């Protein structure tokens, strides 16, 4: 048998192996996505559904060129969009600040304690997300745990407004996404070669200089990976603002849900969803391009 | 030897053991390293040589004792403030930086002006023979090249002292020998003191001005390589610095002749004269290096002899090694030059050999408890 034969046979085998997942992706991801893209350019039907005519004003309502006959440009959508971005960025930063030092701490523990800590990190996955969020409602609400304790201690005489604020949403998101940040950050911190830290100090660098020039660059893959994994679902998150933001603080996820289920304006909902996806894709693209520019750097860090 | 570049006084360090108790890595070590000296710390693993090195670089804090570098007390000084640089065992090159950035690291930290920085990086790379590789990444280099980058990085800040922690252990034999010579040349060129840690006795003897043999946290002997090799102060040093035949026995005077008689009644003749010969009756160990034994041809009168039954003859190339036993059953190893190989067939047939040695070559080691 010649080498070509082996190669083409391998190709066929690979094709057979890849066929089921490709089919699955095509039917359940690409097709619905295509429908969403098409819908986002159609006019809303009067009683829900769509009218089959080209209608760019769904995006216009968000970006400022609304259909002059029926609708007005409302900056509230851009405001919600920016707020969602802000909340997602803050969530990423807070989880990073919490997880980065914690990862160093855990990585220096003896092996037995290490696996125990990793087990603790994954523990929240064993309870339902909704249950965990409602616990935060009990903690944050007007007659909740914190307010009760503070009032009994005499620190405050009127309950603090904690629930149904942007702060409450951030607390909830941080709480949910901490494991997603911790695991990739921990993986790269764990691999860090401490003799490099010694080498840096030996060459005259202070602890802070060593941190900036050696530790951060070498753990960057974990930081970036964790940030992406947290940012994407945080941006489009819908459960947390629904539970902890109430009707007051909307995020993009809730807006989309409202358009589809309450306002029955499917095209507008689809356009909003496309905006979220575009934002994520642009960020991912920028990241991939900067990685490609650093080229072998990413490889060198293993 | 002039003033010293490094001085340790009473340096002590103990580590707790996981199963309880402590292990003494350094036990009241005193050490003086002269300016421009190449000193090797030699010892088996766990002897404290790496701890000693790290005490000087600042990564190990002493329990007791003081350290001076170039006359300045640095006992409590953190590593980044010590005028000392290290070549690490696994090189510890920064994988995310180019060769040039690795070498220039110390200068970047010290905020050296860009033009001077680049000029010095180029000079350091030229010194180790890596000109033109500035923009490579460490992983694109061979082990030997990485070794040179580590060296260039460590000398660029012109330290007063360079510490080398088994830097050659990862290289193959040929490269290692080439690097040994290069290191020695480099040290002479730079005019800075080197403290070199190794467990390889040949490496230590080849390169050093002085060798410090460590065992159990104590410097056993610190001497010029040939003195440590020929006149070890105890049996540990004798064994660690190469093969040796050691005969434990009692010193006896027989007329004008002095000899060491073992418990099995083997007798090794020693020179009666000499500075520090213990009195007759003392317990001593007589040492004969294998290469100091030769085949007694025609019974030369000036040499003493030792009869052995031969167990094995090993052909090494330029030499033969004869492994045998004395009448009392003690193992003896003798290295015979190949120009005596015409006698080998006879020995193979009779399984007996008469080994000759010069009585002056026999080195006496006082046994603990009997010395002075």
Image (cartoon, coloured by chain):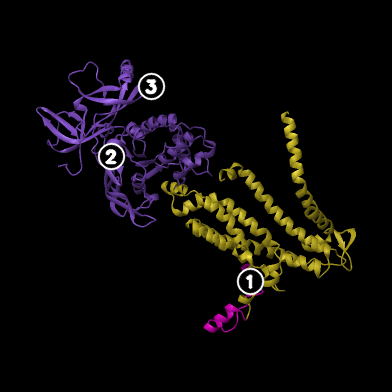
The one nearer the camera, A273 or B217, is B217
Q: Is residue A92 left or right of residue B217?
A: right
Magenta residue span:
A143-171
How far apart, in angstroms, are the residues tagged by discs 3 and 1? 82 Å
Residue occupying the far left of the picture? B255
What residue sits right under mark 2 in the picture?
Answer: B236
The one nearer the camera, A258 or B235, is B235
Q: Secondary structure at mark 2?
A: helix
Q: Is residue B179 left or right of residue B2?
A: right
Q: Name the residue at 71% across, 56% down.
A: A279
Q: Name the spot of residue A241 as percent of width and height, x first.
A: 69, 69
How far apart, in angstroms, are the residues tagged by discs 3 and 2? 29 Å
B94 part of magenta stretch: no
| Chain A, chosen colour in render | yellow
How far apart, in angstroms, are the residues tagged by discs 1 and 2? 71 Å
Chain under numbered label 3: B
A169 part of magenta stretch: yes
Q: Name the spot of residue A140 as percent of width and height, x first.
A: 62, 76
The one nearer the camera, A261 or A81, is A261
Q: Name the spot of residue B92 as percent of width and height, x first.
A: 46, 43
What residue sits right under mark 3 in the picture?
Answer: B317
Q: Nearer the viewer, mark 1 or mark 2?
A: 2
Q: Name the spot of residue A10 as percent of width and height, x first.
A: 73, 37
Chain under numbered label 2: B
What residue sits right under mark 1 in the picture?
Answer: A168
| Chain B, chosen colour in render | purple
Q: Secondary structure at mark 3?
A: loop
Chain under numbered label 1: A
Q: Secondary structure at mark 1?
A: helix
Q: Do pointers 3 and 1 mark residues of a single chain?
A: no
The C terminus of chain A lies in which quarter of the figure? top right
């Amino acid at each position: 048998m010649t080498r070509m034969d082996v190669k083409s046979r391998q190709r066929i085998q690979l094709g057979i192996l890849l066929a089921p997942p490709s089919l699955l992706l095509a039917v359940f991801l690409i097709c619905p996505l295509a429908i969403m893209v098409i819908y986002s350019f159609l006019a809303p039907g009067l009683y829900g559904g769509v009218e089959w005519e080209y209608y760019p004003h769904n995006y216009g309502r968000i970006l400022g060129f609304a259909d002059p006959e029926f609708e007005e440009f409302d900056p509230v959508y851009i405001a919600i969009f920016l707020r969602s971005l802000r909340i997602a960025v803050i969530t990423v930063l807070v989880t990073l600040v919490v997880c980065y030092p914690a990862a160093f701490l855990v990585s220096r523990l003896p092996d037995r304690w290490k696996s125990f800590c990793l087990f603790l990190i994954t523990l929240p996955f064993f309870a339902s997300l909704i249950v965990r969020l409602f616990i935060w409602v009990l903690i944050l609400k007007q007659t909740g745990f914190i307010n009760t304790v503070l009032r009994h201690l005499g620190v405050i005489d009127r309950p603090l407004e904690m629930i149904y604020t942007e702060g409450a949403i951030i607390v909830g998101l941080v709480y949910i996404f901490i494991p997603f940040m911790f695991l990739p950050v921990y993986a790269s911190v764990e691999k860090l070669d401490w003799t490099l830290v010694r080498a840096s100090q030996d060459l005259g660098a202070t602890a802070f200089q060593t941190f900036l020039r050696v530790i951060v660059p070498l753990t960057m893959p974990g930081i970036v990976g964790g940030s992406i994994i947290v940012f994407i679902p945080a941006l489009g998150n819908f459960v947390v603002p629904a539970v902890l933001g109430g009707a007051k603080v909307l995020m993009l996820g809730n807006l989309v849900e409202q358009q589809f289920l309450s306002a029955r304006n499917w095209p507008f909902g689809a356009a909003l969803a496309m905006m979220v996806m575009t934002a994520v894709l642009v960020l991912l693209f920028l990241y991939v391009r900067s990685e490609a520019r650093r080229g072998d750097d990413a490889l060198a860090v293993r | 030897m002039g003033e010293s570049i490094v001085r340790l006084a009473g340096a002590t360090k103990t580590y707790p053991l996981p199963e309880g108790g402590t292990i003494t890595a350094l036990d009241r070590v005193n050490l003086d390293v002269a300016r421009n000296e190449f000193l090797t710390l030699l010892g088996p693993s766990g002897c404290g040589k790496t701890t000693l090195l790290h005490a000087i670089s600042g990564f190990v804090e002493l329990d007791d004792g003081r350290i001076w570098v170039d006359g300045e007390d640095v006992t409590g000084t953190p590593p980044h403030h010590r005028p000392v640089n290290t070549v690490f065992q696994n090189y510890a090159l920064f994988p995310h930086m180019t060769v040039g950035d690795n070498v220039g690291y110390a200068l970047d930290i010290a905020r050296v002006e860009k033009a001077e920085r680049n000029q010095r990086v180029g000079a350091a790379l030229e010194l180790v023979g890596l000109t033109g590789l500035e923009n490579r990444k460490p992983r694109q280099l061979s082990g030997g090249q990485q070794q040179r980058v580590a060296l260039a990085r460590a000398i660029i800040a012109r330290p007063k002292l360079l510490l080398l922690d088994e830097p050659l252990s990862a290289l193959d034999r040929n490269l290692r020998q080439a690097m040994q010579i290069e290191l020695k040349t480099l040290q002479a060129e730079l005019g800075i003191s080197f403290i070199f840690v190794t467990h390889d006795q040949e490496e230590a003897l080849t390169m050093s001005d002085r060798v410090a043999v460590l065992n159990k946290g104590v410097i056993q002997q610190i001497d010029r390589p040939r003195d440590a090799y020929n006149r070890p102060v105890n049996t540990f040093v004798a064994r660690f610095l190469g093969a040796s035949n050691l005969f434990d026995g009692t010193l006896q005077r027989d007329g004008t002749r002095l000899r060491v008689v073992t418990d099995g009644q083997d007798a090794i003749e020693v020179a009666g004269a000499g500075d520090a010969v213990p009195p007759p009756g003392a317990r001593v160990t007589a040492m004969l290096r294998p290469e100091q034994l030769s085949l007694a041809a025609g019974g030369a009168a000036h040499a003493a002899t030792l009869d052995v039954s031969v167990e094995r003859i090993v052909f090494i190339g330029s030499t033969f090694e004869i492994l045998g036993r004395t009448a009392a059953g003690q193992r003896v190893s003798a290295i015979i030059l190949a120009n005596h190989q015409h006698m080998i067939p006879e020995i193979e047939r009779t399984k007996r050999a008469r080994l000759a040695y010069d009585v002056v070559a026999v080195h006496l080691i006082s046994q603990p408890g009997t010395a002075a």
